[in-house]
Image (cartoon, grey):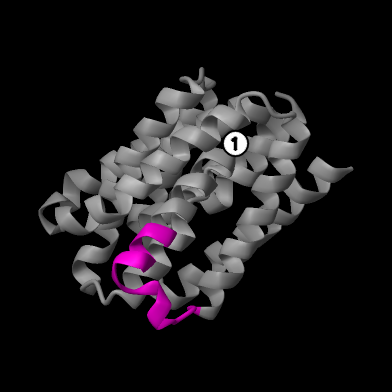
Amino acid sequence: MSTALIVTTIAVVVGASAQATTGIGFGLVSSPFLVALLGKEGLRTSIFMGTLTCIAALLVHHREVKLPSAVRLFVPAAVVSTGVAWIVRGADTERVAAVAGALTILGVAAMARGLRSRRLEGDLGAVVAGALCGGMTAVGGVGGPPAALYSLNAGWPARSRVATLQALFLALNLVTLASLGLPRPRPVLLVALAVGWTAGANVGRRLPEHGARTATLAVAALGGAFALIRGIS
């Protein structure tokens, strides 16, 4: 097994564990490594596997989805994602990796600060957050932070927040993959996804939410820095 495959396998395990534990993190943790080491195929693979984690989460929490809230973000996200994905298909792999790394770092910083602003509420906030979510998904598979920050500022109930975001990401990932094309993920990465999800679902019951979230953001920042450095070197 090559070094690149070992690193990406570990990243998928950690990302899936984070997603199962906290409801966020697969794209933030896994995508920078996948994009930096596997290029556009890594981007497609990350989005595809992120779709699988959304399905797994919704099988349990589908009753808590607030569909109107998800649609509100999905419409601008889908429009922007389709356009950006068309650009990404013709872009250099190194540039995609660098942009993905930079977006990951910015997303981690915003989530770590828990950015609060009245401008992030209402219709305008939904359009901006949705557009950023779609663009960041198409470029680096890291569209979670804008949507998560919007949901916090809009006051979505805690019980439905994660489920509603999973519904959003599921639909958005499918639209993005329709533009980027389907991947051919290596079987070992799919196994890693299942292992990480199972571990996160079991361990997550014993970990304090704040500690798990902090660890997720720390690993995501490391991945973002790795992708950025690799992309510009």
Horizontal side, residue 14 vs residue 1: left or right: left
**Residue at 30% across, 46% down:** 75
Residue 176 placed where, x, y %?
43, 33
Residue 224 placed where, x, y %?
68, 54
Number of numbered discs overlaid on the protein picture: 1
Question: What residue does disc 1 label?
Answer: 9
- Residue type at tag 1: Thr
Image quarter of residue 231: top right
Q: Nearer the viewer, residue 95 or 21?
A: 95
Can you say whether 83 is above or below 119 in the image? above
The outermost residue toward the left is 63
Main secondary structure found in the magenta portion: helix
Q: Nearer the viewer, residue 213 or 77?
A: 77
Residue 42 placed where, x, y %?
60, 30
Q: State the quadrant of the C terminus.
A: top right
Q: Secondary structure at mark 1?
A: helix
Q: State the quadrant of the N terminus.
A: top right
**Residue at 70% across, 58% down:** 222
**Residue at 34% across, 62% down:** 126
Q: Nearer the viewer, residue 183 or 80?
A: 80
The magenta segment: 114-128
Can you say whether 153 is above or below 182 in the image? below
Q: Is residue 125 magenta?
A: yes
Image quarter of residue 178: top left
Is residue 61 at all visible to an observer of this figure?
yes
